[in-house]
Every structure is written in structure tokens, then in C-alpha cells.
Image (cartoon, rainbow, N blue to C red):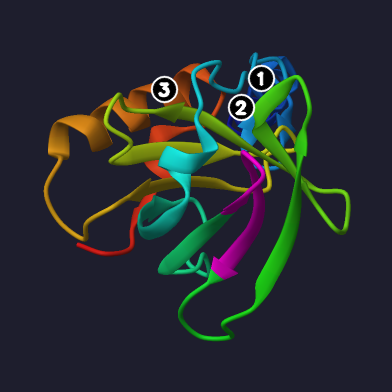
Amino acid sequence: MRLRLTQTALVLALCLITACSPPMVGARRADAPIASTTRFEASRFAGPWVMRHAIDRTAPRNLSFEEGGGQIIGLHYVDGSGQRMALTSDGPHPARFTDTRGRALWVLWVDDDYRTALLGAPDGRLAWIIDRRKTGGADRIDAAVRLAAANGYDPNDFIALNP
């Protein structure tokens, strides 16, 4: 009888802890703020990138952003399918893009020299840390992970994809 009460109390405690946890939106805490970078130049961001860390193992390993008219207008998956996803920029927010299916993709942070960037989605479906090189820049990668946490992502969810 005593064991049964202990087990019941444990189950109730776990339910309460779960109920008190902030809700998740995809892989993001729903109560966490998220913001795109305000310093963004499409011409500097355009070009090839390597996926260094992501919250999803199926993220493309190599990608390239296409610039046109001072805005990012496309995302090419360089490996695998080679597909191109058309993107439109959100006028007053040049680091926010929307794909043809209406899904948002935001540049949350990019270092001063446009070598490393953190991308995310307000709906929490993705978080990417991309870099111009496959290796190096550990300090920038660490900064991106810290900023991902500030935007509601769990740093433990990131998987190194190009070690």
C-alpha cells in the first residue's frame, strides 16, 4: 500500500513538473522571444555556406543563398536534391525570409565578417548554425549556440553535422 502511494505521488509530481514547463513551439520554448538581426547585408550574406550544427539531422550539409536587387531571393541546397527554394524578404526586416509555402526563415545572428550565422524559425521547426568553412571558428560557433539559447532553443538539441 505504501509503495503504491509513493508511486502515485511520483506520477503526480511528474505531471505537475510537466505542466509547469514552458510550452514548446517546434524545438523552441514558446515563451522565449525571438528576433532577427538588424545588421544584415544581403550581398555579404549571399553565397555558399556549410551546415555546422542543426537541430535536425536531415538539414542540408551545404547550401547557398542567392541575392538579387539587394535582397536574398533564393536558397539552394547544394548537396543531395540540389533543390532551389525561392525566398522573399520581409521589406522592413531584410534578415527575415518567407519561402513559397509561407514558412519563415530568419537570420538571428551573423558575425561581423559574415563567416558564421545562426538561422531559426519562429515556429521552431529549424535552427541552423552555418559557416563559410567546414572547420574552425569555434568561438563563433559557441557564440551562435549561446544566442540560440537566448532565442528559446535548447543547446543540447544541436547536432554537429560537419565535424
Camera-side residue: 76 or 67? Answer: 67
Q: Residues within 10 Å of mark 1 (few under 14, many from 20)?
A: few
What residue does disc 3 label? 147
Which amino acid type is marked by label 3?
A: Leu
Snapshot quadrant of residue 45: top left
Q: Residue at x 40, y 38 (%)?
A: 117
Secondary structure, mark 2, is helix
Camera-side residue: 71 or 54? Answer: 71
Q: CA distance from mark 1 to mark 2?
A: 17 Å
Q: Residue at x 57, y 68 (%)?
A: 76
Q: CA distance from mark 3 to mark 2?
A: 35 Å
Secondary structure, mark 1, is loop
Q: Residues within 10 Å of mark 2 (few under 14, many from 20)?
A: few
Camera-side residue: 145 or 140? Answer: 140
Q: Position of residue 150 (x, y in %)?
A: 48, 17
Which amino acid type is marked by label 2?
A: Leu
N-terminal of the two: label 1 or label 3? 1
Q: Position of residue 156 (x, y in %)?
A: 38, 39
What residue does disc 1 label? 21
N-terminal of the two: label 1 or label 2? 2
Q: How many marks?
A: 3
Q: Position of residue 2 (x, y in %)?
A: 61, 27
**Given this view, does label 3 or label 2 mark the residue nearer the observer?**
3
Which amino acid type is marked by label 1?
A: Ser
Inspect this view and state whether residue 1 appears.
no
- 70 to 47, vertically: above or below: above
What residue does disc 2 label? 10
Q: Which residues are magenta?
A: 67-76
Inspect this view and state whether residue 96 appears.
yes
Q: Residue at x 49, y 51 (%)?
A: 55
Task: Name the quarter where the C terminus is drawn.
Answer: bottom left
